Image (tube, helix red, strand yellow):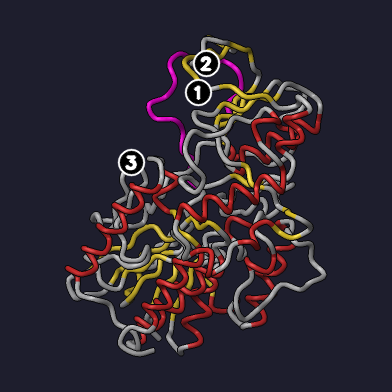
Amino acid sequence: MQKQVCIIGAGSSGMVAAKALKDLGISYDCFEKGSNIGGNWRYNNDNQMSSAYRSLHINTNREIMAYSDYPLTRDLPMFPHHSQIIKYFEEYVDHFGLRNSITFNTGITEVVPTSNGLYKVTTDRGEVKEYTHVIVANGHHWNPRFPDPPFAGTFTGEVLHVHHYRVPEQIMYKNILIVGIGNSAVDIACEAAKLHSGRVTISTRSGAYILPNWILSKPFDSLANPLTAKLPLSVQRYLLKVSLLLARGRQEAYGVPLPKRPPLQEHPTVSQELLNLSGRGLIDYKPNIKEFRGKEVVFEDGTSETYDLIIYATGYKATFPFLKDKAFEVSANNEFRLYKKVVHPDWPNLFFVGLIQPLGAIMPLAEIQAKWVAKLIKGTCRLPDVASMTKDIERDTQQMRHRYNASPRHTFQVDFYLYKETIERELRRNGS
């Protein structure tokens, strides 16, 4: 029997999309390139797209990250290891009977809109099917981004992107320069520093606000709530500054550079260890790279050091190689134009789930996106007209540019509670 919807990917967003469709009795096929579910959270995933490393823990607490109808058990640590998250995903899929609806070891090579309003979907097995709707849930942390333009000169040591980091043996007994100060960069820097096997340096153009995991025995991210999310941005910044002072004092006292921008103008970095290790002199900091001279790296402040290994923690490109005929384009700066980060206004029935970077956990937001998409497909929710959607996209783009510094990572940015409320309003549009 011909299915109505094609879901691309069975990671944390794809599988919750499958659940939302199943709940409303909508027929679908879900295709997963790898041999199991979990996407980016499956360590050594055989789909070759996972960025998980052996020591990875999630940096949002278990209460916030769980799906609404399947909580994590309290016997898990507050910030679970990737193996525990995968186990949770597997239990979720089996509990709701989703596994048999997923076609594993099957990638999508082409999605093309047809003249009769359908989408022709081709798999890497050469199979071709048509669907009325397509849900893209292939993730956006799998195609490594490097500095563009590249730094001058040539580095003759080893080069690695964080996407390919897996185990400490890759960094032992080496002097390491990590380019970037996001979550993965800091995790690897701390892991390397604890090995005491070489010099560890972070190169950052502008620094980052370092948020701890804990404050007064409570998860730091539990301070955020629907009420504080609606406060003026200046008040939110003040509360965050006070909370950070209580939790860990002034980060510059540990030798960690403080951004010139105010808090909440960029995605923060979460680490309980970075400040302590930096204060002990196990991690040092340099400004942006000016040029390479073999293994010597010259920085913009005129200083230079030699390194054995450079690790680029410079983010990812949002890439959808299966979308043909310019069905969806992402700019070189990762800018994309979707209504509420989900709906393509010019291509009916093409949806994106999980294409966001929240201040908080992504799983519950992907879940509510999926519920909205399912109701749009069912017809119990409706979209505004194309002109209204386009106007809303432009307004959102301008707001993002005004609030956040120009960076590819911030084009996906959403505030957890405000975005959740936005999608909840969409769920109520024209009845639901």
Q: Which residue is mark 1?
A: 288
The residue type indicated by label 3 comes to Ala
Picture residue at 63% right of the left edge, 61% below the top = 223
Direction from residue 224 to residue 197 in the image, left or right: right
How far apart marks 2 and 1 lie (CA) works out to 6 Å
- For label 3, the crowd category at 10 Å Cα-Cα, with few meaning under 14, some 14 to 19 and many 20 or more, is few
The stretch in magenta equals: 142-160
The residue type indicated by label 2 comes to Phe
Please give the label number shown on residue 231. Answer: none
The residue type indicated by label 1 comes to Asn
Q: Which residue is mark 3?
A: 332
Vertical side of 315 occupied by 416: above or below: below
Q: Which residue is mark 2?
A: 299
Q: Which badge, 3 or 1, comes first in the chain's sequence? A: 1
Residue 17 position in % (x across, y down)? 49, 74
Vertical side of 6 occupied by 170: above or below: above
Residue 408 position in % (x across, y down)? 41, 43
Q: Quadrant of residue 99?
A: bottom right
